[in-house]
């Protein structure tokens, strides 16, 4: 691992990630996708699931260096409380977890409650956890180690026609000195308040949702982009001077059932200035 500052994709997949499935071991490494997880040097992970500990091992990241965990939302491909508690227990220092109210509540629940499969009931279960938690508030910047993180509202986990936000799905503006990262997983077309908060702030690295690739999707029911919608969102960001010719744009949260083979799709996207994510991809800052 290089010692310079960078962002690394540890899991480029979506809810149908294929990593570890019996029929995928023969695929090129770029087409074996873990559930979403990302690493920002020196000590921050974004999203955490059962593929994450193995990814840290594979990509040579010492777990003991991890101090902070940002959770975008409570879907299982981004958030697995029991895995997080197990991981934290292995660390020399407490793991500080930042997330929405449901994420914090779920971690709190695990402190004294466990689901017992035999009886089909939740039961009391007291176990000390090596965790600290902090609930994020939209638009309110917090210090996470040596970066500043502003939680932004994603367009995801919503029953849109009824305007029912099932839970806040968070995107993040991450700032370190003069560098800005936008973390846009998971989201469909960006929320107007999120575009307003980003307006006029040039982004160095944009991690964008491209879940459905070339498939036609209905924006009413989907909380994701396809390629065409992603291009429209990038135009929205360009119109607000967030994205310019220097911005590194990365397409991630790639559905194995909808995105084609990396070696075929990546050149098409590169023609538009988009880098297709794969597990292990290092993005210098
Ligand atoms: Zn997801
Ligand atoms: Zn999701």
Image: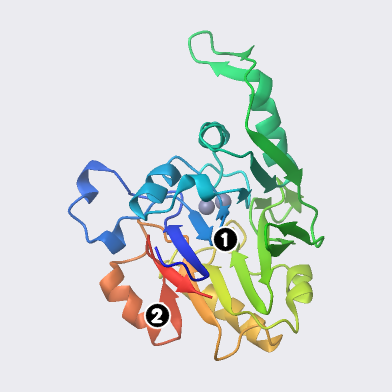
Scheme by which the image is coloured: rainbow
Q: Residue furthest left?
A: 26
Ligand 1 closer than 8 Å to the CB at disc 1? Answer: yes
Ligand 1 closer than 8 Å to the CB at disc 2? Answer: no
Q: Residue furthest bottom?
A: 245
Q: Quadrant of the N terminus?
A: bottom left
* Residue bearing the label numbered 2: 269
Compared across the picture, whether 34 is left or right of 284 comes to left
Q: Specify the label residue 281 is tagged with.
A: none
Q: Identify whether 224 is placed above or below 86.
A: below
Q: Identify whether 38 is placed above or below 66.
A: below
Tell me residue 230's x, y (percent).
Answer: 53, 74
Question: How many angstroms separate mark 2 from mark 1 (CA)?
Answer: 18 Å
| Neighbour tally class for label 1: few under 14, some 14-19, many 20 plus, Cα within 10 Å | many
Q: Identify whether 177 is placed above or below 127.
A: below
Of pointers 2 and 1, the one earlier in the residue sequence: 1
Q: Specify the label residue 185 is tagged with.
A: 1
Tell me residue 139's x, y (percent).
Answer: 80, 62
Residue 210 seen in the figure: no
**Residue at (29, 44) in percent of width and height:** 20
């Amino acid at each position: 691992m290089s010692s310079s500052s960078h962002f690394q994709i540890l899991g480029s997949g979506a809810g149908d990630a294929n990593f570890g499935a019996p029929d995928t071991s023969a695929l090129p490494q770029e087409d074996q996708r873990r559930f979403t997880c990302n690493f920002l040097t020196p000590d921050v992970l974004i999203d955490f699931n059962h593929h994450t500990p193995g990814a840290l091992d594979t990509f040579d990241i010492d777990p003991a260096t991890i101090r902070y965990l940002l959770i975008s939302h409570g879907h299982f491909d981004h958030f697995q409380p029991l895995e997080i508690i197990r991981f934290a227990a292995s660390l020399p220092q407490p793991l500080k977890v930042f997330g929405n109210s449901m994420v914090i509540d779920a971690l709190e629940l695990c402190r004294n409650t466990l689901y017992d499969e035999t009886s089909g009931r939740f039961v009391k279960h007291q176990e000390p956890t090596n965790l600290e938690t902090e609930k994020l508030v939209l638009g309110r910047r917090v210090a996470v180690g040596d970066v500043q993180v502003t939680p932004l509202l994603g367009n995801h986990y919503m029953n849109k026609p009824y305007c029912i936000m099932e839970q806040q799905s968070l995107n993040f503006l991450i700032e370190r000195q003069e560098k800005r990262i936008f973390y846009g997983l998971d989201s469909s077309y960006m929320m107007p308040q999120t575009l307003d908060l980003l307006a006029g702030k040039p982004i160095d690295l944009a991690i964008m949702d491209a879940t459905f690739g070339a498939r036609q999707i209905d924006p009413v029911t989907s909380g994701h982009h396809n390629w065409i919608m992603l291009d429209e969102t990038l135009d929205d960001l360009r119109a607000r001077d967030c994205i310019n010719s220097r911005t590194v744009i990365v397409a991630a949260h790639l559905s194995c059932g909808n995105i084609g083979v990396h070696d075929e799709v990546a050149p098409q996207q590169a023609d538009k200035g988009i880098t297709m994510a794969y597990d292990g991809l290092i993005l210098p800052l």
